[in-house]
Image: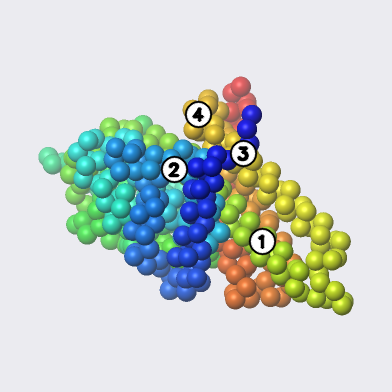
Amino acid sequence: MDFALSEESEAIFDMARDVGMAEIAPNAREWELQGTIPKELWPKLAQLGFGALYVSEDRGGSDLSRLDATLVFEALSMACPSVAAFLSIHNMCAKMIDTFGSDDLKARYLPDAVTMEKVFSYCLTEPGSGSDAAALKTRAERTNDGYRLTGTKAFISGGGYSDAYIVMARTGEDGPKGVSALIVEDGAEGLSFGGLEDKMGWRSQPTRQVQLDDCPVDAGDLLGDEGHGFTYAMMGLDGGRLNIAACSLGAAQQALDMTLDYMRERKAFGKPIAEFQALQFRLADMEIELQAARTFLRQAAWKLDTGAHDATKFCAMAKKMVTEVGSRTVDQCLQLHGGYGYLADYGIEKLVRDLRVHQILEGTNEIMRMIVARDMLRA
Ligand SMILES: Cc1cc2nc3c(=O)[nH]c(=O)nc-3n(C[C@H](O)[C@H](O)[C@H](O)COP(=O)(O)OP(=O)(O)OC[C@H]3O[C@@H](n4cnc5c(N)ncnc54)[C@H](O)[C@@H]3O)c2cc1C
């Protein structure tokens, strides 16, 4: 058993950290205030292959392993977890198109997804169905040319910002087997958006409802087969969960690094606060938790890469554990900064806000436990 990253993997991590520190970190706070990420950023990341991390090479993608992809998200999150997580959603969509799309669909959408000239959003959640996603009600009625979509998608990251949307909609019976996945491009007739959601964190990413009102979709824009959309949507989520966990890990590591520097400088009672043993123990506890989280996350990624039978369970366990460790760590880092941790200028309070949602999306951490417990009881 070899726990070391290969030289190539180290290089991927370093490349992502460097571009994050150069292109994202200096702007992260400003983008949060503006409530948007400039679209010019994406082609710069795409030039490094980050627009299609696990799209096959013959379609212009990077064809990275899931493990290497987590390194990209861990490293980019050191600059800003909100930007990194948005990139993860686009990559999840690109992978869905590459894996399940017809040759025609791939030829039409993948080139722009790879270069990030087009950014993609993932539309599963609805106002009445989140955790119970298979209860979705958005309908795709058959027409002579394809479908007409009617319904509302809630909490869509990139809603009103992205260039195309993968929409899970009902083409058949109730439940997961009646769901199909369809691509809707920005500007489509009947496509509109709700107001900008005012969120606790992830504020640089615009989140809106996506409304579909008799929105025509060509038959050629059906992704894969009718009735398989829910399976495609769930398959994307295993990797998405690893990425979200990696985003928590990178941001927490960044907060811990910043805290070490701060504690060496900040004095109280005549000495640097780093010299108080009670605080040193807290540093040690954070280090132990973060290292354990990193190892667990990489094991789950390895399971997904090797097609292990329990990969879904491990992705769920890692998502739950790492996102909770991440939030605990950034909260502790804020505490160790004292009052300054509460000030935006110190960069820690943003991480506390950004990481909180990682326990809620890509399946809540309660749902992660449900997946784990079901698997245990089945076994
Ligand atoms: C900032 C943000 C961005 C998002 N981006 C996207 C996106 O891009 N695309 C998208 O499709 N969705 C997106 N979501 C939606 C997200 O995936 C859902 O919010 C999430 O799945 C939870 O659904 P819900 O909010 O409806 O909560 P509910 O499902 O209503 O859950 C409420 C509470 O009940 C718990 N619960 C529910 N069922 C069970 C159960 N069986 N057992 C135990 N506990 C249970 C939940 O864990 C939760 O604590 C986003 C959400 C946020 C906040």
- Distance Cα–Cα, label 4 vs label 3: 17 Å
Q: Residue at x 36, y 60 (%)?
A: 44
Give the label, 4 or 3, closer to the camera.
Answer: 3
Dot 1: element: helix
Query: Which image quadrant for residue 301?
Result: top right
Which mark is nearer the camera, 1 or 4? 1
At label 3, the amino acid type is Ala
The Cα atoms of the two marked residues, 2 and 4, are separated by 27 Å
* Image mark for residue 306: 4
Circles 1 and 3, Cβ within 8 Å, touching? The answer is: no
Q: Is residue 116 visible?
A: yes
Q: Is any part of residue 141 visible from this angle?
A: no
The residue indicated by pointer 1 is: 257
Compute the Cα span from label 2 to label 1: 38 Å
**Residue 361: x %, y % from top left:** 51, 50
Q: Amino acid at mark 4?
A: Thr
